[in-house]
Image: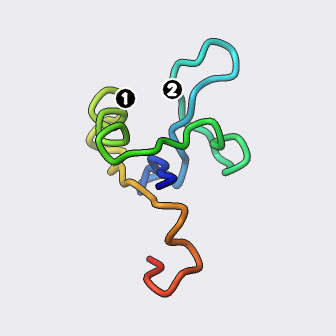
Amino acid sequence: MRLLVQSQATGRFLAPSLEDGTPEWVCSLREAGGGVVQDLEAAHQLMADWCDLEDAAQVVDLDRLGAADDY
């Protein structure tokens, strides 16, 4: 699995900062590449630790994009 946390409110992705590794919201998938997690539990933990309710965060499985069971 290759999972990303995405804000439904803004479309941004949660990824570690290049400066200190602290998660921050970024606009592009290129910037979010370092935010890919391998398991659902880790993605949910990121959401619990770093997302606000108004972010309406969701987990996106990159392996589903373009597949028969795409979103």
Name the spot of residue 46 as percent of width and height, x first. Answer: 37, 33
Name the spot of residue 70 as percent of width and height, x first. Answer: 47, 79
As drawn, is 27 to the left or to the right of 14?
Answer: right
In this view of the protein, which residue sits in the foreground, 64 or 51? 64
Name the quadrant containing residue 36: top right
Disc 2 element: strand
Name the spot of residue 61 as percent of width and height, x first. Answer: 46, 61
Label ID, residue 23: 2
Name the spot of residue 8 as percent of width and height, x first. Answer: 42, 57
Residue at position x 63%, y 42% in the image: 32
Amino acid bearing label 2: Pro
Label ID, residue 50: 1
Amino acid bearing label 1: Trp
In this view of the protein, which residue sits in the foreground, 25 or 44? 44
Cα–Cα gap, marks 1 and 2 = 7 Å
Name the quadrant containing residue 53: top left
